[in-house]
Amino acid sequence: MSKINLKIAIIGAGKIAFSLVDSLIDSGFVVSIIISKSISSAKELASKFDIKQYSDNFRDIPITCNVFFLCIPDNQLNLVAKILSKRKFDFRNSVFVQMSGALTTSVLDALDKKKALTASFHIMQSFPSKKTIRISKIYVAIETNSQRAERTLFSLANKLGLIPFKLENRNKIFYHLAAVHASNFLVGNIFNSQRLFDNAKVKEVDFREIMFPIISSTFSNIKKYGSSKSLSGPIERGELQIIKKHLNALKKIKYTTKVNIEALNYISQSLSLLALIEQSGVKLSTVQNIICEYLLIELKSISSKI
C-alpha cells in the first residue's frame, strides 16, 4: 500500500484520535471519515480538521477505505471488530489497526478470520485531553503477525515522523506494564507527594513550585546517568532510623479505606529501590539488609489487617 492509496477511517473520537488525525492530515494522508458512537463527538473531531464525512453508523464507512484506526477503549475492540467483519470491505487488502498498549492483535480475530490484515499501533505517549499533541520523534510499538501490515505501518509511522519498532505479542503485556509505571503510576506518585506535602502544612510556597525542580532534575539525571546512578535518599544511604520515622508518620495519617495505602506504597517502592541497588551490581550493605527485613515485617503486619 502506498501513501497515495491509503484511505483512512478513524473509529472513535476520543483523546488520542485528535492527535492522530492531526498528524495524519499534516503528513498528507487522506482521512475519509470519522465514526463515533456519539454523533456529536464525531462531528467535533471532523469539524476540527475539515473532514466532510462523519457518522455514528458503521454502515456509512466508504467501501474504498483500506486503513482503519480503532481509537476506542480496549473493552470495545472485540465487539467493534465483529461489527466491522460483517461489512463488505476488501478485507484482504485492508489493515485494521487497534491502538491498545496491552491487548494484542488477537482481539481482532473476527477480522483476521476474514483474511484482513490486523495489527496494533501503540504510541508511547499519554493523551490526557483532546488538545493535539505533536507525535513526531516518539516511539511507536507495532505488533502484528502479518508482514504486509508490518511494512505498511512501519512506512506510515516513518511518514508521521514516529520511530517504529516491532513488538512480539507474547511480550506486549510487559511493555504496557512498563508504560503504566512510567506514566500512570508516576501521576499517582506525584499525587501522593502532594498529599504528604499538604500534611507538612507549608503555606508560603506552592507544592509545584517547590517540588517540580527536584522532579525535573531527577528526570535529567536518569536520562543522563540511568536509574541506578540517579538514586539518593535514605534507602541508598542505609538510614534505618529515618525509614522507621517515615513509616511511623504514615501510620498516623487517617484514611477512609481499611488499608494504609501510603504505607504500603512506601514499603513497596522502598523494596524496589533495594532491588535496583542489587541489580546494579552493588551488594547490599548490612544495614540495607536489615532495612529489607524490617520492611518485609511491616508489609506482613499491614497485609494481615486487610
Image (cartoon, rainbow, N blue to C red):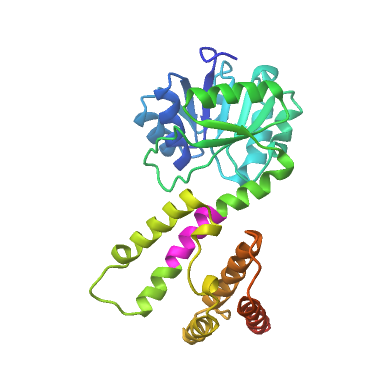
Q: Quadrant of residue 69?
A: top right
Q: Is residue 106 visible?
A: yes
Q: Is residue 14 visible?
A: no
Reply above or below: 4 against 22: above
| Residue farthest to the left, as pictured | 204
The residue nearer to you, when weighing 26 against 151, is: 151
The residue nearer to you, when weighing 64 against 21, is: 21
| Residue farthest to the right, as pictured | 113
Quadrant where the image shows the N terminus:
top right
Where does residue 158 sit, x and y in percent of width and height? 52, 24
Instruction: Tell me which residue sits at (63%, 64%) in the image.
Output: 282
Reply above or below: 188 against 111: below
Instruction: Tell me which residue sits at (65%, 60%) in the image.
Output: 281
How would you classify the magenta stretch by its main secondary structure? helix
Where does residue 75 sit, x and y in percent of width and height? 62, 47
Quick check: is 188 in the magenta stretch?
Answer: yes
Q: Quadrant of residue 172?
A: top right
Quadrant where the image shows the C terminus:
bottom right
Quick check: is 266 in the magenta stretch?
Answer: no
Where does residue 130 sit, x and y in percent of width and height? 39, 42
Q: Is residue 161 left or right of residue 287?
A: left
Chain part drawn in magenta: 181-191
Instruction: Tell me which residue sits at (41%, 75%) in the image.
Output: 196
The residue nearer to you, when weighing 102 against 107, is: 102
Instruction: Tell me which residue sits at (66%, 17%) in the image.
Output: 93
Q: Quadrant of residue 236?
A: bottom right
Q: Is residue 126 left or right of residue 214?
A: right
